[in-house]
Image (cartoon, helix red, strand yellow):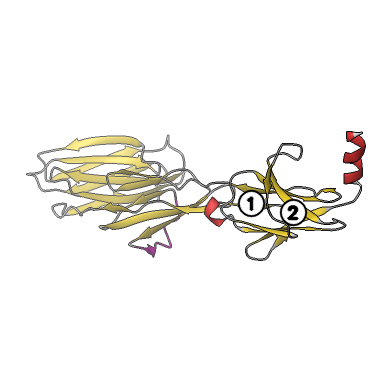
Amino acid sequence: MRTLIILLFLSFGINTYSQTIDGITSGEATYCSANDASGVICCTGNIGQIIGWELSTDWWATSLPIQHYQNCITYFSASNSICYRAITTIGYSTSTCITVLNTIPPEVTENGDTLTSSEAVSYQWFLNGDTLYNDTNRVLIVSQVGSYHVETVDSNGCASASINRLVGTKEIHSLVKIKYSPNPTEGLLQIKMELNSTLKYDLKITNILGEQLLSEKIDNTTMFSKQYDLSKESNGVYFLSIENSENSKSVHRIVLNK
């Protein structure tokens, strides 16, 4: 008998549709955060009289009655996988589900003057609220003091922003001259520097993720010249940094193209 009643309810062809806050009509709605999850669901078709609405995570699940007796119901800050259906004098409507992804903001790690975002599909960096239009990689080399943050888009198309991070750096004024060539390089990189002999220096080459490929300590010299071989590394962007014992740093961009 119960099966017969259910079949009779299904035969009436009751339909629901979901209308988001911006007026787009669809069968379901997906939001990047609960703060955005607001909209309207209406029940149309040969529905008879609306008795009320229910919340359910499954069409057959026991649901929580919503005391609302009109053809449309408004929802605010919906939770994950919440479904709505109408109770009418001739049966239940089909369910319309609201999905909230609850996007996680990106995290930024700092290593010296290098900022690295957590992984995403795309990146855009900002300095003091202004867009750094040329800085759209996962890694940013900081060139000036300021407040930095990154905005990312994930695989679901959801955008979110990291918290602001105040970063301070200063260039090495005691580094008289530096030359590195060729750039781009096919592997061999010649570095020549004129230095202040009273200071100690750390020379490092890192990849775009901030991983160190080589390092060298330089001390008690005014002239430094050495050739490095990067031919075993993959093509891409690398960073040459020179930091002195006064914690000042100079960073230079190297391109490897074999």
Q: Amino acid at mark 2?
A: Gly
Q: Amino acid at mark 1?
A: Thr
* Residue 196 percent coordinates (x, y): 10, 48
For the residues marked 2 and 1, what is the alpha-carbon distance in whole angstroms? 10 Å
Residue at coordinates 43% horizontally, 37% vertically from top-left? 233
Judge left or right: residue 252 versus residue 17.
Answer: left
Picture layout, residue 38 above or below residue 223: below
What count of labels does the image hold?
Answer: 2
Q: Is residue 182 visible?
A: no
* Residue 51 percent coordinates (x, y): 77, 52
Residue at the spot of label 2: 27
Looking at the image, which is closer to me, 252 or 187?
252
* Residue 258 percent coordinates (x, y): 47, 43
Q: Are marks 2 and 1 in contact (CB under 8 Å)?
A: no
> Which element carries disc 2, helix, strand or loop?
loop
Q: Which mark is residue 247?
A: none
Picture layout, residue 75 above or below residue 245: below
Residue 50 found in image quarter: bottom right
Residue at the spot of label 1: 30
Q: Which residues are magenta?
A: 129-137
